[in-house]
């Protein structure tokens, strides 16, 4: 599956909510691809939203902790599929390399993007059910 097809299938609203959830639960600090020291000023970040521009020119990343709590409540619910939960946590929260995630979860490398898109779809559907059930 090509990256373009994956991007087209991915629900961008749910993807943004999952990125917000991951940032809130990681503490908003640097991920595994960035460095929190002075060395980080000279290393290229793999996160496209983190740039090497001066602080005044950087785009502020606004976190929504209430929405992150809602997403967390849905993902950690008892009825949420275990494999999809592990995949979402590895992809968004821990930012694991896809090769490691594929080995641990038994996913073919070429099916990884499809599996992530499917897990995001499960999250989207569960969020819709959660909002319908909440008065």
Image: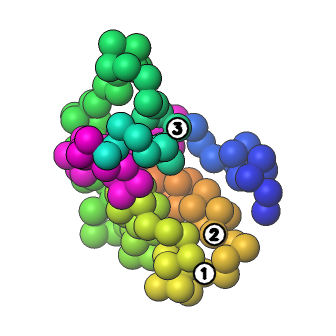
Q: Which residue is mark 2?
A: 112
- Identify the secondary structure beneath mark 1: loop
Q: Residue furthest top?
A: 56
Quadrant occupied by the N terminus: bottom right
The local crowd at label 3, few if under 14, some if 14 to 19, many if 20 or more residues have their Cα within 10 Å, is few
| Residue 27 painted magenta | yes
Rendered residue at 34%/69% (across/down): 79
Quadrant occupied by the C terminus: top left
The magenta segment: 13-38
- Seen from the viewer's position, the closer of residues 30 and 67 is 30
The quadrant holding residue 94 is bottom left
Inter-mark Cα distance, 2 to 1? 6 Å
Inter-mark Cα distance, 1 to 3? 26 Å
Observer-side mark, 2 or 3, equals 3
- In percent of width and height, residue 41 lies at 35, 37
- Identify the secondary structure beneath mark 2: helix
The quadrant holding residue 64 is top left
Inter-mark Cα distance, 2 to 3? 21 Å
| Disc 2 + disc 1, Cβ < 8 Å | yes
Mark sitting earlier along the chain (2/1):
1
- Residue 48 circle label: 3
Q: Which residue is mark 1?
A: 107
Rendered residue at 37%/49% (across/down): 34
- Seen from the viewer's position, the closer of residues 115 and 32 is 32
Q: Can residue 70 be seen in this snapshot?
A: no
Rendered residue at 22%/34% (across/down): 66
- Residue 97 circle label: none
Q: Can residue 5 be seen in this snapshot?
A: yes
- Direction from residue 84 to residue 134 in the image, left or right: left
The quadrant holding residue 114 is bottom right
- In percent of width and height, residue 36 lies at 25, 46
């Amino acid at each position: 599956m090509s990256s373009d097809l994956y991007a087209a299938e991915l629900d961008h609203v749910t993807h943004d909510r999952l990125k917000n959830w991951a940032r809130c639960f990681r503490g908003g600090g640097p991920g595994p691809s960035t460095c929190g020291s002075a060395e980080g000023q000279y290393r290229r970040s793999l996160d496209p939203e983190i740039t090497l521009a001066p602080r005044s020119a950087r785009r502020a990343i606004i976190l929504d902790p209430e929405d992150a709590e809602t997403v967390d409540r849905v993902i950690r619910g008892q009825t949420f599929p275990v494999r999809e939960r592990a995949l979402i946590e590895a992809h968004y929260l821990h930012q694991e390399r896809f090769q490691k995630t594929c080995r641990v979860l038994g996913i073919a490398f070429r099916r990884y993007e499809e599996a992530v898109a499917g897990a995001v779809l499960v999250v989207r559907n569960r969020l819709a059910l959660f909002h319908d059930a909440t008065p």
